[in-house]
């Protein structure tokens, strides 16, 4: 909330505009009056400061997001091929992602995202992995799943989703590519 208020502050906006536009006014004037070093510095220093601010801001955002180190180790990866478990995931509208591989970097990101959303019930979380072929076997050959698709799902019952965070969680999961398994099967 404080970050949004800071961006809406007219003094902050004016400061950023001066840093962006000021060097293109001051620099040529100083260069034209034979103050070469001052003209160059008038251009270089503000843009270097903005670049440094951007790098530090991005680093802080990354640090704030990744609150839990080695979060990938908190997943219990459960390979699934039986139709009963896949249908149970379907019946529970499991949170599902299409993935290339379940690499540690992706799992670390996913766990921290769930933590930041405030929907983790416990420290450990089951992650069910299966393929498009497994979906065809569970829901019929007529469904148009690519057999080589790899999916991973999390039971919603394993997450702490309640009335206060349900709408926000549903909106945010779309932004990161998460879908409900019953939607995937229904729209195949």
Image (cartoon, rainbow, N blue to C red):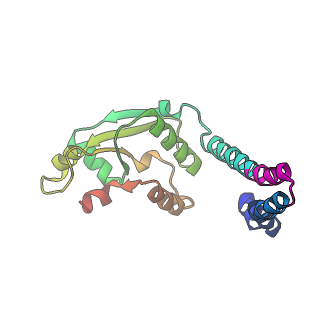
Q: Quadrant of residue 91?
A: bottom left
For the N terminus, give its image quadrant.
bottom right
133, 7: nearer the viewer:
7
Q: Give x and y (percent) for residue 186.
A: 26, 61
Position of the C terminus by quadrant:
bottom left
Q: Is residue 91 left or right of residue 37?
A: left
Left or right, 9 with respect to 55, comes to: right
- Give me the residue at 75% from left, 59% from top: 2
Quarter of the image for residue 68 reads: top right
In this view of the protein, which residue sits in the foreground, 63 or 186? 63
Name the residue: 49% across, 62% down. 171
Q: Based on the displayed image, in which of its 4 quarters is residue 133 positioned?
A: top left
Q: Main secondary structure of the magenta part?
A: helix
- The answer to whether 3 is drawn above or below residue 121 in the figure is below
Q: How many marks?
A: 0
Extreme-left residue of the structure: 141
Question: Which residue does the image show at 79% across and 49% down from the upper left?
Answer: 45
Relative to 12, residue 43 above or below: above
For the magenta stretch, what is the residue range? 33-47
Expressed as whole percent of the image width and height from the top left, the position of residue 114 reads: 52, 46
Is 34 inside the magenta-drawn segment? Answer: yes
At 62% from the left edge and 43% from the top edge, which residue is drawn? 62
Q: Position of residue 58 (x, y in %)?
A: 65, 47
Q: Is residue 26 left or right of residue 154?
A: right
Residue 45 lies in the magenta stretch? yes
């Amino acid at each position: 909330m404080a970050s949004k208020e800071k961006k809406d502050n007219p003094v902050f906006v004016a400061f950023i505009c001066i840093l962006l536009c000021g060097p293109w006014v001051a620099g040529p004037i100083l260069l034209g009056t034979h103050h070469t070093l001052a003209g160059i510095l008038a251009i270089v220093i503000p843009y270097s400061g903005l670049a440094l601010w951007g790098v530090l801001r991005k680093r802080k955002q990354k640090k704030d997001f990744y609150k839990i180190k080695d979060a990938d180790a908190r997943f219990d990866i459960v390979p699934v091929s039986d139709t009963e478990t896949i249908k149970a995931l379907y019946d529970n509208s499991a949170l599902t992602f299409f993935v290339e591989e379940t690499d540690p970097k992706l799992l670390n990101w996913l766990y921290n995202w769930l933590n930041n959303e405030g929907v983790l019930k416990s420290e450990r979380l089951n992650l069910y992995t299966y393929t498009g072929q497994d979906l065809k076997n569970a829901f019929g050959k007529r469904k148009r799943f690519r057999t080589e698709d790899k999916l991973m799902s999390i039971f919603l019952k394993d997450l702490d989703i309640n009335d206060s965070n349900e709408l926000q969680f549903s909106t945010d999961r779309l932004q990161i590519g998460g879908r409900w398994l019953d939607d995937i099967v229904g729209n195949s």
